[in-house]
């Protein structure tokens, strides 16, 4: 392990838009279950169990009116769910956090020195925030369907912990062609065990950018090594994938 790291070189994506270059900071990345108090009269300390999961992010943004930049993403104040992802780097295996969320606000504040920053709150909707790892080296560009042999593996560093499945988050930033399917393949050893599709870990055929998707498999064993592959007919697909293999049973 590399040990401690900084937040430099981070990436921020919102439903297929790369807004990292317009982001001043993230003042909050939070998640986890709400604690439920189950303390009874026989106990001398609190007893708690996890309740509903929640989460969110608070993004502090510069004002950037360029095409495809932050103002175009945030200013419509969309009511539909948006996929927010923070990635601590652009290497395969870099830590990342994603949340399917409602955007709350786009409030600006002008400082005395003339600076202008805007705050966006992303509040989880339906699912809590998920920490995991990048399965692509930041935004990846495929110019045609790409098989497992052509891409580097994501090593999860251990054999399957059990039939707990995984969740994957996909940002499709740009696309030219008929359709592209982005999916995961797995191998137990990245050698003799040939890569095969992870059941349920697929976007299906995508035909337009920009968009962000959250995809969860069933309760299946997921092997140690993963690769992101593409199929379809296209000349350009730019995308990023964040993956988390559950170490325990998860109920959505």
Image: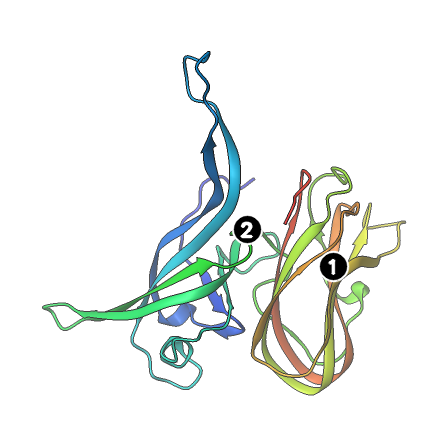
Q: Residue at x 60, y 62 (%)?
A: 137
**Image position of 198 with respect to 82: above or below:** above
Closer-to-camera residue (188/91):
188
28 horizontally vs 199: left or right: left
Residue at the extreme left of the image, as rendered: 112
Q: Circle 2 is placed at which residue position?
A: 130
**Given contact means CB atoms under 8 Å apart, are the residues at marks 1 and 2 in contact?**
no
Q: Circle 1 is placed at which residue position?
A: 227
Q: Which mark sits nearer the N-terminus, 1 or 2?
A: 2
Determine crowd level at label 2: few under 14, some 14-19, many 20+ residues with C-alpha closer than 10 A.
Answer: many
Point out residue 151 in the picture as x, y percentages from the top left corner.
73, 64
**Image position of 238 with respect to 127: above or below:** below
Residue at the extreme front of the image, as rendered: 41
Q: Quadrant of residue 157?
A: top right
178 horizontally vs 174: left or right: right
Q: Residue at x 48, y 62 (%)?
A: 101
Point out residue 226 in the picture as x, y percentages from the top left corner.
74, 54
Closer-to-camera residue (118/66):
118
């Amino acid at each position: 392990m590399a040990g401690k790291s900084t937040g430099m070189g981070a990436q921020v994506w919102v439903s297929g838009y790369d807004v990292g270059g317009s982001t001043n900071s993230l003042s909050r990345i939070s998640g986890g279950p709400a604690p439920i108090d189950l303390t009874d009269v026989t106990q001398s300390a609190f007893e708690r169990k996890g309740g509903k999961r929640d989460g969110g992010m608070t993004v502090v943004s510069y004002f950037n009116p360029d095409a495809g930049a932050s103002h175009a993403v945030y200013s419509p104040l969309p009511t539909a769910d948006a996929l927010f992802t923070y990635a601590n780097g652009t290497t395969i295996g870099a830590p990342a956090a994603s949340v399917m969320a409602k955007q709350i606000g786009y409030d600006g504040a002008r400082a005395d020195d003339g600076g202008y920053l805007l705050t966006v709150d992303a509040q989880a909707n339906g699912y809590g925030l998920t920490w995991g790892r990048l399965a692509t080296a930041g935004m990846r560009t495929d110019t045609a369907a790409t098989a497992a042999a052509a891409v580097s593996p994501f090593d999860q560093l251990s054999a399957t912990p059990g039939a707990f499945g995984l969740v994957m988050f996909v940002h499709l930033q740009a696309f030219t062609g008929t359709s592209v399917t982005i999916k995961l393949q797995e191998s137990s050893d990245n050698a003799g065990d040939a890569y095969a599709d992870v059941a349920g870990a697929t976007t299906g055929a995508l035909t337009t950018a920009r968009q962000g998707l959250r995809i969860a498999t069933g309760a299946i064993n997921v092997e140690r090594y993963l690769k992101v592959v593409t199929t379809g007919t296209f000349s350009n697909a730019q995308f990023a994938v964040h993956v988390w293999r559950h170490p325990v049973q998860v109920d959505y």
